[in-house]
Image: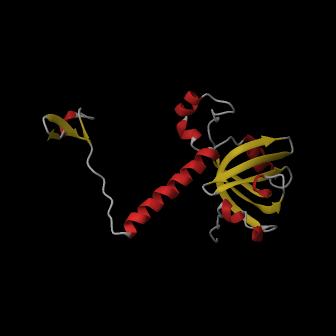
Amino acid sequence: MAAINFEKIRNILDKKNVDKPVHLRGWIYRTRSSGSIVFSVVRDSTGIIQVTIKKGNLPDEEFSSAQKTLIESSVEIEGVLKEDRRAPGGYELKVTEYRVINSAEPFPIVKDQSPEFLLDQRHLWIRSQKLTAILKIRSTVVGAIHKFFRERGYYEFDAPILQPNQCEGGSTLFEVKYYDSKTFLSQ
């Protein structure tokens, strides 16, 4: 049996894939159902795409699974890419196979949450499109800075961290005299 070639969403959204079957792995970003059709937005590290799952286009077990799938569940999907102006990105994947790899717990973040709540749920909030975009920009800027200095012969190093109090257990404590003060090497 040949291995399945899973595409990144960025590559799927290329016009050359219209009306062709594609395979995709990702996480459910948003989902809604109206009885005989399920609309899900799936994300991966490269973007988002809307997928439509219609009852009768795939086995009943897979359709039932698609109806129950919660936000942040990981899925593998096969479908045919169609152009649709209403869909995010202008394309929609008509699903022919749907497989849940791992079901998620109910997602606690809904619209209009307080900043305190969002900071407490940072590991989940960071998956939003806004924060993902910010992190991608930050990665690009830091990468450009590293490239700039490496091209000019500079080396990066991580200096030791000294702190005024003990950390973790005292059995592996390393004391350093820093001028007239005692400091400790962070572990």
Where residue 9 sits, quadrant-wise, is: bottom right
Task: Please give the name of the residue rendered at 70% of the width and 63% of the height, measured from the top-left corner.
Answer: 23
Residue 94 in view in this figure: no
The C terminus is located in which quarter?
top left
Q: Residue 22: where, in percent of width, then height?
A: 73, 65
- Residue 126's place in the image compared with 25, above or below, is above
**Residue depicted at x 75% and y 46%:** 66
Q: Nearer the viewer, residue 176 or 79?
A: 176
Asked if residue 133 shows in the view, the reply is yes
Q: How many marks?
A: 0
| Residue closest to the eye, 26 or 180 | 180
| Residue 166 appears left or right of 137 | left
Position of 60 with respect to 42 (left or right) is: right
Q: Residue at x 77, y 68 (%)?
A: 15
Image spot of residue 146 (x, y percent) = 42, 61
- Residue 35, position in %: x, y? 86, 41
Q: Residue at x 81, y 41 (%)?
A: 33
Give the quarter of the image for residue 5. bottom right
> Would you place residue 81 above or below residue 136 in this image?
below
| Coloration of the structure image | secondary structure
Residue 157 percent coordinates (x, y)? 30, 57
Position of 94 with respect to 9 (left or right) is: right
Does residue 44 sit above or below 165 in this rendering? Answer: below
